[in-house]
Image (cartoon, grey):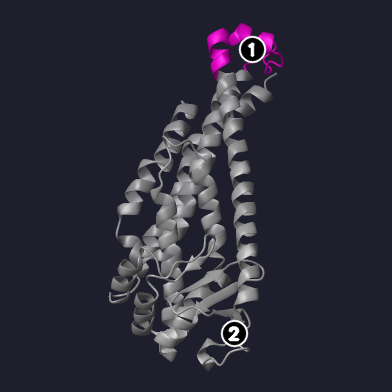
Amino acid sequence: MSGLAFTILAVMLVGPVPALLARAAWPLRAPRAAMVLWQAIAVAAVLSAFSAGIAIASRLFVPGADGRPTASPAAEIGRLGWPLWILDVAVLALTLLIGARLAVAVIRVAVATRRRRAHHRMLVDLLGLSADAVSVRACARGRNLRVLEVAQPLAYCLPGVRGRVVVSEGTLESLTDAEVSAILSHERAHLRARHDLVLEAFTAAHAAFPRFVRSASALDAVQLLAELLADDAAVRVAGRAPLARALVTCASGQAPLGALAAGGAHTLLRVRRLSGGGNSWMVSTAAYLAAAAVLVVPTLALAIPWLTELHRLFTAV
């Protein structure tokens, strides 16, 4: 029953739960807490998937004649029978396969993303101008800033150890000092918080689970929350109105793959949010409690019974 419960929980946390949470409106009022909840759901989904496989595969360790777990396939088949033994071995193999897919996905996403960013960073350093090399306003100065000679307003950042904030000349010419400060604060907030690492983890988890159970809404929702968190950091520096105007100006700017752009598909939603009442500590508290429950309650309710059974098997006399 523990294996079945873990399986149901894993499927729920990978598919229906992310789909419902992605349609909710309250994360706009508590983006940091919502991000923690999404991470808790992702971790719980992975742990539940592994726990389901381990719980079912643990039946291979059936007690032998002496009360201790059997140590040979022949003894296990004698106790379980061929059908159950084949099922348990298949489940164990599937669990190991999911683990391998997750590890491969993490490595593949990390390597591809960093290679892409390194290539684009090299191009930006070669083609772009540093803040010291061009006559820019004081609000736009920064050691990691690069200015592209492009008329279209755009702003994005390239995360990493040697992160870059990239803006176009069109951005600097179109925005006021307050708006430039807001858009740069937004991008630098991405670099400080390393939102790219969170997005990489969700991208890898999305790639690891089978298509028929995973939900694409999780990755999209986390990308929006990363932008909201950067927006909140920019508001604390420059205010709501300058940031809103800067987002509208840079909305059509296209950033390269692997970069985090100020504009994008959620610009209208983010601008509307800036005209609202701000974040809610009550909603945040409820979300933090939900995140803790997602991790703690299933562990206590489902893991303890089969761990107790394993302990009984291995300590039998």
Q: Position of residue 262 (x, y in %)?
A: 44, 71
Instruction: Please report the residue visible at 57 percent of the width from the left and 14 percent of the height from the top.
Output: 86
Q: Which residue is mark 2?
A: 142
- Which disc, if any, is residue 63? none
Three-letter code for the amino acid on which mark 1 is drawn: Glu
- From this view, report whether residue 315 is shown above or below residue 210: above
Residue in view at x 53 percent, y 40 percent: 208
From this viewpoint, is residue 237 visible? no
Query: Who is closer to the viewer here, 283 or 181?
Result: 181
Residue 65 magenta-highlighted: yes
Q: Residues within 10 Å of mark 1 (few under 14, many from 20)?
A: many
Q: Is residue 226 left or right of residue 17?
A: right
Query: Going from the N terminus, do you reach mark 2 or mark 1 first?
Result: 1
Q: Which residues are magenta?
A: 62-87
C-alpha separation, residue under disc 2 versus residue under disc 1? 66 Å
Q: Where 307 sits versus 236, above or below?
A: above
- The C terminus is located in which quarter? top right
Q: Is residue 92 magenta?
A: no
Location of mark 1 (residue): 76
Q: Quadrant of residue 284?
A: bottom left
| Most foreground residue, 27 or 315 | 27
Q: Residues within 10 Å of mark 2 (few under 14, many from 20)?
A: some
Residue type at mark 2?
Gly
Total count of labels: 2
Give coordinates of residue 202: x percent, y percent: 51, 51
134 or 90, nearer to the observer: 134
Indicate the secondary structure of the residue bearing disc 2.
loop
Q: From the viewer's perspective, is the residue at label 2 or at label 1 nearer?
A: 2
